[in-house]
Amino acid sequence: MQLTGHITVDSLMGLEAYSKYRQTHKAEVMAHRQIRTVRLGDHMSLQFESETTIRYQIQEMLRIEKIFDEAGIQQEIDAYAALVPDGSNWKATMFLEYPQAQARKLALSQLIGVEDHLFIEVDGHVRVHAIADEDLVRENADKTSAVHFVRFELNQEMRSAIKSGARVSVGCDHPAYTAMKTMESACVNALRQDLK
């Protein structure tokens, strides 16, 4: 999978080429994704996206849906490409994970607004809360969604501190779900690559 910095129809693999690529590289992509995943407490995880994870997601959707026409491919690009970080931020998919249907229903009713309570904290800097679900409505008055898309904007000083090895924590300060975790060094090392 060739990274180009910009996902276009022409930069994606055809279905046959991707099928061959997938057979030999799926484990590599899954390992890349795993390093960039942070669990927050028992029921929340953040998957920090990259061009690699988003290209893989688009290619998987094209494969599963058997999409090969240019308009259909562009539609998938439009749906996912905005999740690629652009140098001044980290972007993530947040998952609320409750295996039991009844527990999930109750939690989603109690966690309305949870996406706005996610934060990144770089040592020595002010906490940065997520900008969530841009151009999407993912909750209503009764419940939130189990999946949210978030962006953490990091100023130049924060980016410099991260590149210099500052400790980075991620957390949630929602009244019904509080958790905070220092990111593993392997995760921070991977996410550093996303910053200009």
Image: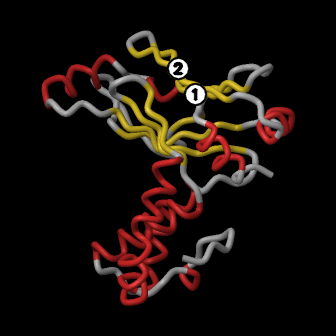
In screen coordinates, is 165 left or right of 148? right
Q: Nearer the viewer, residue 62 or 189?
A: 189
Residue 117 vs 101, above or below: the answer is above
Circle 1 residues within 10 Å: few <14, some 14–19, many ≥20: many
Residue occupying the point 80% across, 33% down? 158
Circle 2 residues within 10 Å: few <14, some 14–19, many ≥20: some
In screen coordinates, is 1 left or right of 15? right
Residue occupying the point 32% across, 23% down? 141
Residue at which label 2 appears: 180
Do residues under tags 2 and 1 come within 8 Å of each other at their CB atoms?
yes
Residue 75 horizontal/vertical position (percent): 45, 70
Residue 135 vs 165, above or below: the answer is below
Distance Cα–Cα, label 2 vs label 1: 6 Å
Question: What's under tag 2, amino acid-wise?
Answer: Met
Q: Nearer the viewer, residue 16 or 67?
A: 16
Instruction: Give the quarter of the figure containing the N terminus.
Output: bottom right
Residue 167 horizontal/vertical position (percent): 71, 28
Q: Nearer the viewer, residue 108 or 23?
A: 23
Residue at which label 1 appears: 170
